[in-house]
Image: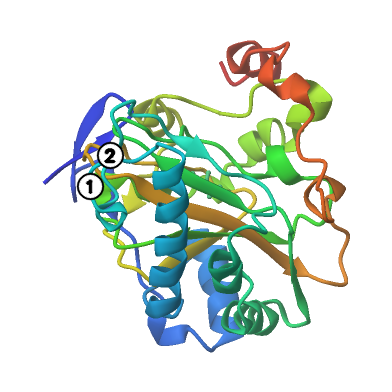
Amino acid sequence: MKVSMGVHQLKMEGPYLTALRESNDIREDAAALQARMEEDGYIFIRGFHDRNQVQQARSEILNQLHQSGRLAPDADPEAGLVGPDNKSAFLGGTNTDKPAFLELVNSPRVMNFFTNYLGGAAATYDYKWLRAIATGGSTDAHYDIVYMGRGTPNLYTLWTPVGDTPIEMGTLAILLGSHRWEHVRSTYGQMDVDRDRTEGSFSRDPLELIEKYGGRWATSDFEAGDAIFFGMFTMHSSTVNVTNRIRISCDTRYQLASEPVDGRWIGKKPRAHETALEAPLKTMAEAKKEWGLA
Ligand SMILES: O=C(O)CCC(=O)C(=O)O
């Protein structure tokens, strides 16, 4: 099987790509999960969410996408077929018009999981990153800290595909070992896209990173209910959606309620990124030269 990442076609279980390790056996064991996070930089759990809840959120989102013209107009919205414009939609925000979606990502099941994992009451950002990715769409490699580093670094991203999502529809990929790249953590990992007005993606070429720093990408087919979470210093990206079906996924954030939060992402109307991000003053290539990473 060949997997599309950047401009490359990678072989599963070849030198660049492997499967994610499942952590279902230690799901309830906070100490074992913490140790696994330390070792792998991520935790992948099948059936993390209630599958029915995922399907309800999916229907709600698909109906809205259909109404806004993002899906094939004459097909059943449930088929999730990309519309004639082949446009992705970034639906970041509080998404209060999507109650089933909010029930999924704010559910007691999710909050209790993070409360157990973190060892204290968990809180979630009000801002939810919801994505509908059209054919050809993917995400470049980055650390999340550069986008949300003003609160505690003990913050986790939960990536949830909203529906069955095989690798060819665009799944989250983790660069194994990247959470231990000390020089990258102490340079790129100290950046703040708004303060530094620098683009956030670390690399558009998934193989360049492996050649420079080692490691392998890891991803898997996901079914509705499966989810993966990882820390702020784990390099991740996505495979390319090579299908004609829209990939719906969300990334949502969890931390200890007692620790400082990044104020851009909380409240009824989170401030979010400054518009300057749309016109960064510095490219990543320039920043890398300054950090000695070129
Ligand atoms: O879903 C994607 O394509 C990217 C997700 C991501 O960057 C994240 O979960 O932080």
Q: Residue furthest bottom?
A: 28
- Residue that label 2 marks: 72
| Element class at badge 2 | loop
Q: How is the image coloured?
A: rainbow
Residue 75 shows which numbered tag? 1
Disc 2 C-beta below 8 A from ligand 1: no
| Amino acid at dot 2 | Ala
Q: Is residue 49 left or right of residue 100?
A: left
Residue 173 screen position, x and y as percent: 39, 48
Q: Hey, which quadrant is residue 35 in on the image?
A: bottom right
Left or right of 62 in this view: 80: left
Q: Residue at x 86, y 66 (%)?
A: 259
Residue at 26 percent of width and 59 percent of height: 221
Residue 55, position as x, y percentages in the image: 38, 70
Q: Amino acid at mark 1?
A: Ala
For this rendering, which residue is in front, 144 or 100?
100
> Viewed as shown, does residue 200 lie left or right of 151?
left
Q: Nearer the viewer, residue 229 or 138?
A: 138
> Against 119, is 9 above or below?
above
Q: CA distance from mark 2 to mark 1?
A: 6 Å
Q: Are marks 2 and 1 in contact (CB under 8 Å)?
A: yes
